[in-house]
Image: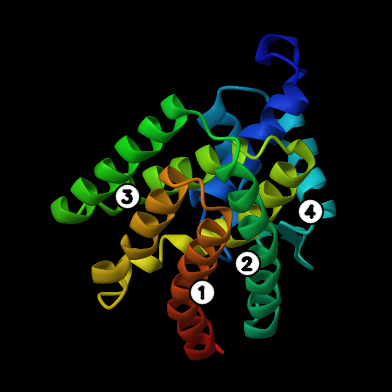
Amino acid sequence: MLKLEHQTLNDRAYGALKQELISGGFSPGQTLVIRKLAETFGISTTPIREALQRLVAERLLELQNNRSIIVALLSAPAFEELTRIRVAVEGLAGEMAASRITEDGLVDIQATLAGMQRAIEAGDSGAYLALNEAFHFAIYRHAGAPILLNMIRDLWGRVGPYLKLLMQAERYKPQSNEAHRKIVAALAQRNGADVRTSIEQDIATAAAVLAGNLRAAE
């Protein structure tokens, strides 16, 4: 991977905008204004415009008839398809990580899980979502599969804007860390099958809450 200082402004803008999608920094259907984004990231409008065009080409953003650009909206069927794909590829990444994770890596993931629990108890949704992302991608990086990791990042670019809705659902909060604890326990035992199963459970639990919101909005 190129170091940041060696990247072009276009690449840096693209990477920053995509990370905002993954992290839930943008909301579903939100209109993205080029000038405001340029001010936020402290660069000119040209690299922002080109980065947005790349994300439209990847269908993470949508170009409207009036030429405005919005964060892509997911229909219920599209969300269901996305969930099934995530279950397959993220489950695989977790299973691969179980046999490759280091002791230091496991300690870091355990610490992240503890931070997630503190965020839940403090009612800090923003901190929880940031740590949730860190938790998952720390595991997936240990799979040692860069192509698979990039696929997962693309999938999170589509679902990320919806994840902030999770913490608005009272029925989700009590179970938000159940699967995460099972994932960590399975990683500690180097049990790839159980890691996969627990990741599948985690995705399915969150998807059930979000799918209800999508159906209600249609």
- Disc with the residue nearer the chain's start (4 vs 1): 4
User: The C terminus is located in which quarter?
Assistant: bottom right
- Disc with the residue nearer the chain's start (1 vs 2): 2
Identify the residue position indicated by label 1 in the image: 204
Label 3 is placed on what type of residue? Tyr
Identify the residue position indicated by label 4 in the image: 56
Relative to 28, residue 2 above or below = above
Identified at 79% across, 53% down, the residue is: 56
- Disc with the residue nearer the chain's start (2 vs 4): 4
Give the secondary structure at mark 1: helix
Structural distance between the alpha carbons of marks 1 and 2: 8 Å
Which one is closest to the eye, mark 4 or mark 1? Answer: 1
Tag 1 and tag 2, C-beta contact below 8 Å: yes
Label 4 is placed on what type of residue? Val
Identify the residue position indicated by label 3 in the image: 128
> In which quadrant of the rendered view does residue 196 lie?
bottom right
Which one is closest to the eye, mark 2 or mark 4? Answer: 2
Identify the residue position indicated by label 2 in the image: 87
Structural distance between the alpha carbons of marks 3 and 4: 29 Å
- Disc with the residue nearer the chain's start (3 vs 4): 4
Label 1 is placed on what type of residue? Ala
181 and 127: which is toward the camera:
181
Label 2 is placed on what type of residue? Val
162 and 1: which is toward the camera:
1
Identified at 60% across, 31% down, the residue is: 38
